[in-house]
Image: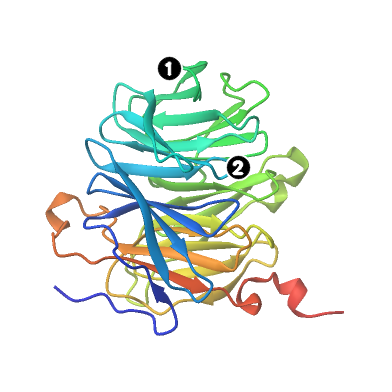
């Protein structure tokens, strides 16, 4: 087994998970990184100004943890897992409680902008459920056409991607009704969706190394486009595993099974940066609250099934200090 190659200028997170990393999310108020993994654990790390990390807390699911997210005020971490439960840790007390349940594993959890305690959970049981984390019963349920694979929300927009390429859009003013349902503009299975920072649209990534930019407003449909990414000179095609938008500039990162991440500017339709190729797949990514840190997990992404899930890794998380010139939109790089 080849060892993962560490990027020379990126910081490696101390005491990483012992199995595949499934989710990364930074606190919206401080440089704390929450990590979910297939070893059933949720780990929380504090990132120091010098790039070093300190493990601060952890809690467990009863099966692989598949997703993790922070509350808007940074006081709670919620995760979902193969145990069909969503669990919440109160950062101030360290107490963990179950706050949601489904009939099948929970693949995605997201706090909504509509309230500090309102949570959306998406599952392989073909539903999205909404919860007030102070109550044991869901406050709303939506039936989906297929198993949920990916979900994101910003403002009044929630986007869900399911099996069989269904893309479902929700106006969170009416959260239990599907606002629009369409097939992905990409021809193969949806792997990731991510909302624009202003909620005016979303990006979709697929298993065939393509990404689509989609706007909501009818008058902006001419701005929709798709492009190839995470492919190599030998014409090998790799999955787009993660899409993360920069919180300040609205540019975005993609990461894939080819072991690279790239920064993109959708306005100029240009690639801003391409990382070196690493010996492993990049499973998930996230920016911190001001976009100065880009975290990515060099870890098995399950795109080739369980037979390729070797126990000796790699399972590593790296922190990249983002240079302003590599993430700013092109029209900001050239004054005048």
Q: Residues within 10 Å of mark 1 (few under 14, many from 20)?
A: few
Indicate the position of residue 227 as horizontal and vertical percent values. Answer: 53, 61
Q: In which image quadrant can residue 237 be found?
A: bottom left
Q: Is residue 214 above or below residue 174?
A: below
> Which SS class for mark 1?
loop
Judged from this view, the residue extending furthest toward the bottom is 8
Judged from this view, the residue extending furthest toward the front is 93
Q: In which image quadrant can residue 9 be found?
A: bottom left
Q: Which residue is mark 1?
A: 136
Nearest the eye: 35 or 148? 35
Q: Residues within 10 Å of mark 2 (few under 14, many from 20)?
A: few
Cα distance between the residues tagged 2 and 1: 21 Å
The answer to whether residue 164 shows anywhere in this view is no
The tag on residue 111 is none
Residue displayed at 55% across by 60% down:
288
Q: Which residue is mark 2?
A: 73
> Which SS class for mark 2?
loop
The mark nearer the N terminus, 2 or 1, is 2
Indicate the position of residue 129 as horizontal and vertical percent values. Answer: 46, 23
Indicate the position of residue 307 as horizontal and vertical percent values. Answer: 12, 53
Indicate the position of residue 235 as horizontal and vertical percent values. Answer: 34, 71
């Amino acid at each position: 087994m080849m060892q993962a190659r560490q990027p020379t200028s990126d910081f490696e997170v101390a005491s990483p998970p012992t199995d595949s990393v499934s989710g990364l999310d930074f606190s919206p108020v401080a440089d704390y990184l929450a990590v979910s993994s297939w070893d059933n654990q949720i780990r929380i790390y504090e990132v120091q100004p010098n790039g070093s990390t300190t493990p601060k807390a952890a809690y467990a699911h009863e099966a692989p943890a598949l997703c993790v997210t922070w509350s808007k005020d940074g006081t709670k971490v919620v995760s979902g897992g193969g145990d069909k439960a969503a669990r919440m840790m109160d950062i101030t007390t360290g107490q963990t409680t179950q706050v949601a349940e489904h009939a099948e594993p929970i693949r995605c959890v997201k706090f909504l902008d509509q309230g500090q305690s309102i949570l959306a959970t998406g599952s392989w049981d073909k539903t999205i459920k909404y919860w007030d984390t102070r109550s044991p019963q869901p406050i709303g349920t939506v039936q989906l056409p297929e198993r949920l694979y990916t979900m994101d929300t910003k403002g009044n927009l929630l986007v869900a991607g399911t099996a069989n390429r269904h893309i479902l859009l929700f106006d969170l003013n009416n959260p239990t009704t599907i606002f629009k349902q369409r097939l992905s503009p990409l021809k193969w299975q949806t792997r990731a969706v991510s909302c624009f920072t202003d909620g005016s649209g979303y990006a979709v990534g697929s298993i065939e190394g393509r990404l689509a930019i989609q706007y909501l407003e009818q008058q902006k449909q001419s701005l929709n486009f798709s492009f190839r990414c995470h492919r190599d000179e030998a014409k090998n095609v790799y999955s787009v595993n993660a899409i993360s938008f920069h919180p300040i500039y609205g540019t975005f990162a993609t990461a894939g099974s080819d072991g690279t991440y790239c920064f993109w500017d959708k306005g100029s339709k240009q690639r801003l940066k391409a990382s070196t190729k690493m010996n492993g797949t990049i499973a998930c990514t996230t920016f911190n609250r001001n976009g100065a840190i880009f975290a990515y997990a060099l870890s098995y992404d399950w795109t080739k099934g369980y037979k390729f899930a070797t126990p000796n890794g790699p399972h590593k998380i790296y922190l990249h200090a983002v240079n302003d010139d590599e993430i700013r939109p092109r029209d900001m790089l050239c004054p005048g």
